[in-house]
Image (cartoon, rainbow, N blue to C red):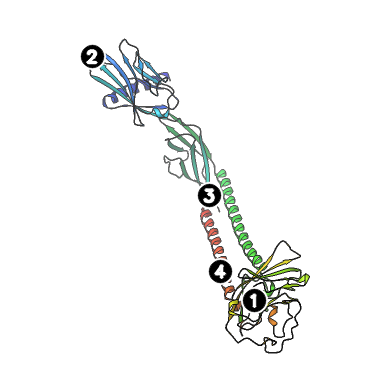
Amino acid sequence: MERVILLLFISLFFLCQAQGRLGCCEQAVSANGVLNLQPEKPPQGWTKFTWRVRRDAGYHQRILTAEENKTVLFFNSTFLGRAVFQQETFSLQISPVSMADSGVYVAEFEDTSGSLHTWCFRVSVWEPVHSLHLETRVLDWEQGWCNLSLVCTVSGAGNVSYSWSCSGDPQGVLEHQPWLHLQVHGDSLPIICRCNVSNPVSWSADSTNITVASCQALASGVSLSYCRVKGLLCLLLLGSLVAAVAITHVLVWQRGPPSHRAPGSSGLCLCCDLKLLKGLKGQSLSFPALHPFFVDITRVSWRSQGTHITEAKPKQKRFTVDYVPRFCGRQFIHPINLSLKIRPLKLGDNGKYEVVMDTLSDPTKLKTFSYSLRVHGGLPMMPAGTSDTGGQSRSTVGPQGVTEPDAGDTGTQGTGGGQPRGSSGGPEACRVQDYCCVVKGYLMATVFGLLLMLVATVDIVTRDKGT
């Protein structure tokens, strides 16, 4: 072993001699190691010797100067305290070496005539190759073949080289990459693959044993894992869609009483956010009834364009109207079903109306319903004392703002008395509601389409990774 090391040192010395005449001698050293630079013997009659360096970072430094029969002078540089000079051999030793020490080191001899003789070394500092980990990744098992990848990972190494070797000549290309793709047939014998990682100063290797049984076991585990993930994802997406549809139905259903639905309709009402009511100028119009759909109402307040216009407290038999001058003498509250009637209608009554209710069963949560009133120019105002249908009124006035239902005022149950002939409060006459339904329909279709695209994408991506 000592003879081999001696031969390598002699070869390196003569190689540096040959390169010294043509260029610089290449020398690699491990980080935190020891760098030894040995120049050629000095010429006869030398008087001065200097070591200097041109770092890879781009700046120059003079390390030391030695003169015959004088003390060696070390300069104030980054090598101070780390550089040792052997005057007998003119060698330079640096310890410990850092990554920043890479560069070109030059030894200069000056003779009595003033001529310079130079010798240079190109030094590269490398991080040593640390622990190596070899991982086997089985992709799939298909038609009797096991498709797998071997991955070599090294911690803390910079620029390294990879080499692979496998027994049994499996199908695959042994490239100089950190990974290796192989195909192993079901009838193959066990295969041993070895990964070697090296740089100019160190190396590390690891190996793995590949058997058909282990490949099948790993492949089945991968398939089960991907199938399970895919199934759970599909169930999650389907559950999310069902939950979204159910929540949409429930929330919208809670925003409107059953009286908002068209006669004969059943099931959930998806378009109760804003009900459109139509009336004729000079006629009367009753908003949808609230009682008996909500039997425990304690307080009802009406607003027009955000302004408080009426209020009713049925438990206390208190009904207050005429908060706003423009509605003075034209507002009436039904004492039983708590429907608000406006008589006679004016064109200025157009706009948005809201009713807010307090109930005994849920006093902390207010119930709010919204309406849009549209008044059209129609028949002239009817004389006082006549009903909407032309007959005599049989209403009897109770407390202020309270009226009994007229004979012709059947709209207090939700159809809206005084609306134009042929129109109703049902969905067919509510274009705002239709628009609401269309928007919700497109929204649900978009969400459903995106979920389907996501499921299809997951299926395509995982198709080759599991069976």
| The label number, if any, that marks residue 112 in the structure image | 2
| Residue 98 against residue 172 in the figure, above or below | above
Per the model, the C-alpha gap separating discs 2 and 1 is 121 Å
Return the x and y of residue 378 as percentages of the image width and height: 59, 85
**Element carrying mark 3:** strand
Which of the 4 image quadrants contains residue 376? bottom right
**Residue at figure coordinates x 47%, y 45% from the top left:** 182
Query: 43 or 446, which is in the foreground?
Result: 446
Q: CA distance from mark 3 to mark 1?
A: 79 Å
The disc, 3 or 4, on the residue closer to the chain's N-terminal end is 3
Closer to the camera in the image, 396 or 362: 396
Q: Amino acid at mark 4?
A: Val
Residue found farthest to the bottom: 391
* Quadrant of image for the N terminus: top left
The residue where tag 1 is placed is 327
Q: Which mark is residue 140?
A: 3
- Identify the amino acid type marked 3: Asp
* Image quadrant in which the C terminus is located: bottom right
Question: How many residues crowd mark 2 within 10 Å: few (<14), some (14–19), many (20+)?
Answer: few
**Mark 4 and mark 1 residues within 8 Å of each other at the beta carbon:** no
Could you tell which of marks 3 and 1 lies nearer the N-terminus?
A: 3
Label 3 environment density (alpha carbons within 10 Å; few <14, some 14–19, many ≥20): many
Q: Which residue is identified by label 4?
A: 439
Residue 46: % across, % down: 26, 14
